[in-house]
Image: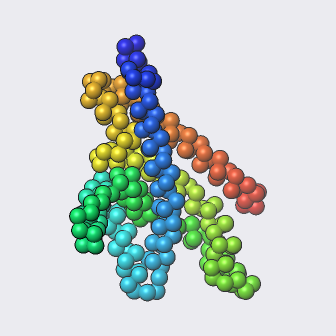
Amino acid sequence: MDQLHLLSFGDHGWGDELLLGLGVTLSLAICTLPFAIALSFLIHWAKMSRNRLLHRFGMLYTTVFKSLPEILTLLILYYQAQAIIGWLVQSVFPGARVSVSPFFAGMVSLSLVISAYGSEVVRAALAAVGREQFEAAQSLGLSPGCAFFKVILPQLWRHAIPGFGNLWIILLKDTSLVSVIALSELTHVAGLAITTTRQPFLFYGLIAVIYVGLVTLSAQAQKRLERRVNRGFARLEV
């Protein structure tokens, strides 16, 4: 019972801090996902481009961010970006100081990593839709951009949801890495609580349960979304 008292809300427990940490974790994941998905499409487009420079950039991007550990990407971006931005600001405004927010650094670094894998999800989804759909849209007089957004994209999501759903779960868990740059997300708050109370089993066990709950809810939401977008297709395939 004394240990459970440490999870209470108020001045004598860590409930408030853990709840705020959970909010930061979810905010970071939710803010990162749209940027990661947008980058996934752009990187796939670069890899498929006939422009040799764009193609090489897309392939190099995917290779680098698939190869580097996520935590190393985060540390390099956070500290190197601070140095570069600080130098640029100092050159324009001598004496001025600027710092990169840990939240922003985490969002950017996780977007880079997730989009490297997301570009492969986009590639597989486009292959499942088929080139003939794009050709049929063009035969109706639609421009390439209009054909993509009105014909290809609505079909593409049906095939991309499982892949992006898995990447969302990976992203949700990878937010814990941002604790190394002192962002007060769930794992960082738990670490502070453990340092103060010397109760590692309680707090690590609690955040483990929270992550399992978040992943379970995400998986259920993904299944519901898949059933929704696949309505009608099952009967057609039969």
Q: Between 208 and 103, which is closer to the camera in this rendering?
A: 103
Image: 168 above or below 92 = above
Residue 14, given in percent of the width and then of the height, sits at 39, 27
80 left or right of 114?
left
Residue 69 shows in this picture: no
Task: Give percent across and percent down for residue 111.
Answer: 42, 60
User: The N terminus appears in which quarter of the rendering?
Assistant: top left
Residue at far top of view? 1
Residue 105 at x, y percent in the picture: 36, 57
The quadrant holding residue 104 is bottom left
Q: How many marks?
A: 0
- Residue 215: give x, y in percent of width and height: 50, 41
Residue at 48% x, 62% y is: 35
State the colouring used for the structure image.
rainbow
| Residue at 60% in and 45% down | 221
Query: Could one spot residue 45 in this view of the protein?
Result: yes
Q: Residue at x 65, y 72 (%)?
A: 149
Q: Is residue 4 left or right of residue 95?
A: right
Residue 199, placed above or below residue 40: above
Rendered position, 149 above or below 200: below
Residue name at image x 70 percent, y 80 percent: 137
Q: Which of 143 and 233 is in front in this view?
A: 143
Looking at the rendered image, the quarter that the C terminus falls into is bottom right
Q: In this view, does 153 lie above or below 181?
A: below
Image quadrant of residue 201?
top left
